[in-house]
Image (tube, rainbow, N blue to C red):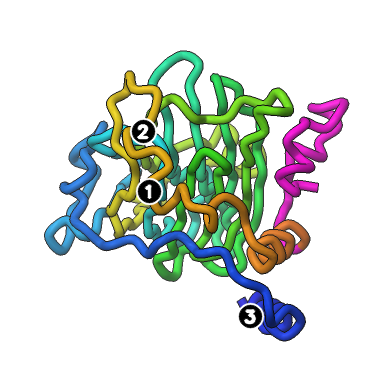
Amino acid sequence: MASFLIFLCLSSLLFPSVILAAPPRTPIDVAFQKNYVPTWAYDHIKYLNGGTEVHLVLDKYTGTGFQSKGSYLFGHFSMRIKMVPGDSAGTVTAFYLSSQNSEHDEIDFEFLGNRTNQPYILQTNVFTGGKGNREQRIYLWFDPTKDYHFYSVLWNMYQIVFFVDDVPIRIFKNSKDLGVRFPFNQPMKIYSSLWNADDWATRGGLEKTDWSKAPFVAQYKGFHIDGCEASVNEKFCATQGKRWWDQKEFQDLDGLQYRRLSWVRSKYTIYNYCTDKSRYASMPPECKRDRDV
């Protein structure tokens, strides 16, 4: 965290006249029941403080999850999460958007647990038209088990931006002109879950879940949704172009945001599909536009 603060101070000194693009609007805390419903293992979801805080519980029998009541076509989708503490190897805490058809679109945060005192790995991915394989993995610059942090997605016609707190960690630009599909006409629901994935999650499945440490608990707050609600069959948002996330200041990152993204790329990225020549003989066309390399 100290290195990040130094980075921001230097950026301000070196580039004092830069006009910042607006950050996404700060979400409003509401109760879970306003926007979400449990999807499985209802008895493994615990509600605290009138539903303003929710705990997902994983044991050797089952994990659990929840989803939004509505489907959305563009907007800003966030959650405050405190990850499973201690020995979390083999567990995955997921927060993602997904449409509901065979050629689905999907925008993923997946937090991969690890052994005690070993860092979490955050994996992101983007599916368009049923095609994914765009994984990127980073370490975080803080311990995500010690406190709540904001994890959010800004999605509009121009770009998808993954944020950790106010730091952009990844962008996926609309590159239809390059032949790359972009999510624009399939409303998505918001999902979150805690589940066992010890066949792949930690060191490729070498580290197995230690069930003697169960139950594993991920904690959630901040269930506000700021999106254009649409039925699953709609192809456009009725207010397209009129919402805050459609405006010019949200159509690209500014200089400071790109420098923050570069800081994450240089210091914390541990895997990037764009540079994986064993999977892609030639670099996927969106990578340079997304400044992934």
Give coordinates of residue 29: x percent, y percent.
Answer: 26, 62
Foreground tag (3 vs 2): 2
Q: Nearer the viewer, residue 135 or 213?
A: 135
C-alpha distance separating marks 1 and 3:
32 Å
Residue placed under numbered mark 1 in the picture: 243
Describe the element under mark 2 as helix, strand or loop.
loop
Q: Looking at the image, can residue 91 be seen?
A: no
Quadrant position of residue 208: top right
Give the residue type that dot 2 points to: Cys
Foreground tag (1 vs 3): 1
Residue placed under numbered mark 3 in the picture: 5
Name the residue at 68% across, 59% down: 261
198 above or below 261? above
Q: How many C-alpha atoms fall within 10 Å of the one at disc 3: few (<14), some, or many (≥20)? A: few
The magenta region covers 267-293
Horizontal arrangement in the rendering, residue 71 relative to residue 14 (left or right): left
Name the residue at 33% across, 19% down: 233
Name the residue at 60% across, 62% down: 140
Residue placed under numbered mark 2 in the picture: 237
Give coordinates of residue 167: x percent, y percent.
Answer: 57, 63
Give the residue type that dot 1 points to: Arg
Horizontal arrangement in the rendering, residue 258 relative to residue 161 (left or right): right
Do the residues under discs 1 and 2 have CB atoms within 8 angstroms? yes
Q: Which mark is residue 233?
A: none
Q: Nearer the viewer, residue 183 or 3?
A: 183
